[in-house]
Amino acid sequence: MEAFAYKNNVLHCDGVELRVVADDVGTPAYVYSARTFVDRYRDLDAAFAGVPHLICYSAKANGNLAVLRLLVEAGAGIDIVSGGELYAARRVGADPAKIVFAGVGKTAAEIEAALTAGILFFTVESGPELERIAALAERLGAVGRFALRINPDVEADTHEYVVTGAARKKFGVDLGRAAELYARSLKMPGVEAVGVHMHLGSQLMTSQPYVAAIGKIRALVDDMARRGMKLTYFDIGGGYGVRYDGERPETAKQFAEAIIPAVQSLDMTLVLEPGRYIAGNAGVLLTRVEYVKRTPDKTFVIVDVGMNDLIRPALYGAFHRIAAVEHAGDEMERVTVVGPICESSDFNAEGIQLPKVAGGDLLAFMGAGAYVASMGSAYNARRLPPEILVEDGRYRVVRTRQTYDELFGAHVLDASQEAGR
């Protein structure tokens, strides 16, 4: 059953009328289906039941604490990329033994916090990072378990900004240097190599790039085993795609059927880091039409969602289908949907067919569960919108709309305040 569907010409989320939510909390507002988050996690978990595996949800996709708690309670681990995400994961009760820490620029403070928490492993992106982890771990009397992130130089058919497994990108260590770095780690008392990691990019429609990259990396795993270093985790990252419009991504079952044969003989625990796959289609962003502006060239539908609330179209040229919350008729109109931000890049959709709307009408940006609220900002001094979770036929606010006092609360207005810090 689709989480977002029409009933009596009104768009619902798991049985809850979205116009009721909008009238209650206002717009813009993010609305999430709790059931969809959990169902997508369970689909992937069941698909990989044939091999030892750990699914670490990528918190950067949607880091709302209520969402993280849902997934942790369902059995998921957490893939983090910052000290803030470590804090969030611990706040919702995530098992440190199910937390993996990725990212190219981990600070000393972040590494120390993760070592103290006892996370499963760090994804190491460079020699200097490994040296830093080793030194900090030795000082703390800890052991920094790590998986070396390999850049397999495999191209992914996706937007250039979210390709991460190509040699020209900043991520990972090339295959030619990986064995040397593993060998160096044996002389560092503060670290222990426990795995290998890769991540190819985001919004990938097919398993083919994964299979190609695994084929390249497994030779390294075999080589390290011959040298006496048995790696126990093979982390294939995330990036599995979802449908925003006409895309046809592989199902969890199809994806698993391609991946499992490629790793099954390695006798390793498979780690997956899905974010968008779990969260993407679990949410919508509600907006209200402020004005309809007709010019000789275009019709602009001006809504209260700006690029600060939904940056993906401006940043990536991404497409989010727009749906009328209430069907008012069959008359369609070609329009450009824009927001209130003082930037020409503040557009949501260019030249789309939309049911004819007027000021005050409600619309929903579909597929807004991943990389939407988490990428939001307060640009133009616009307050962060609320986040709403629909569960068991009821909805609740899981992040309140930011107040102006909260927006400016960290600002220091005069010297007496600054001196008193």
Image: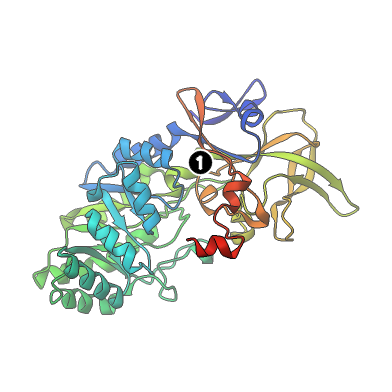
- Residue 333 or residue 130, whichever sits in front: 130
Q: Is residue 288 left or right of residue 133?
A: right
Color theme of the render: rainbow
**Residue 249 coordinates in the image, percent (x, y):** 47, 48
**Residue 71 coordinates in the image, percent (x, y):** 36, 39
- Residue type at tag 1: Asn
Q: Residue furthest left?
A: 228
Quadrant of residue 323 within the rendered picture: top right
| Residue at (18% x, 69% y) in the render | 139
| Residue at (61% x, 51% y) in the render | 310
Is any atom of residue 304 visible in this view?
yes
Quadrant of residue 197 within the rendered picture: bottom left
Is any atom of residue 119 visible in this view?
no
- Residue 112 or residue 146, whichever sits in front: 112
User: What is the secondary structure assignment of the residue under circle 1?
Assistant: helix
Q: Within 10 angstroms of label 1, few (less than 14), some, or many (20 or more) residues? A: many
**Residue 119 coordinates in the image, percent (x, y):** 24, 55
Answer above or below: position of 340 versus 219: above
Q: Is residue 207 left or right of residue 383?
A: left
**Residue 147 coordinates in the image, percent (x, y):** 24, 64
Q: Residue furthest top?
A: 8
Q: Residue furthest right?
A: 296
Q: Is residue 364 left or right of residue 189?
A: right
Answer above or below: position of 16 versus 386: above
- Residue 381 or residue 65, whichever sits in front: 381
| Residue at (57% x, 60% y) in the render | 412
> To which residue does mark 1 refer?
281
Could you tell me how many numbered marks the image carries? Answer: 1
| Residue at (60% x, 53% y) in the render | 408
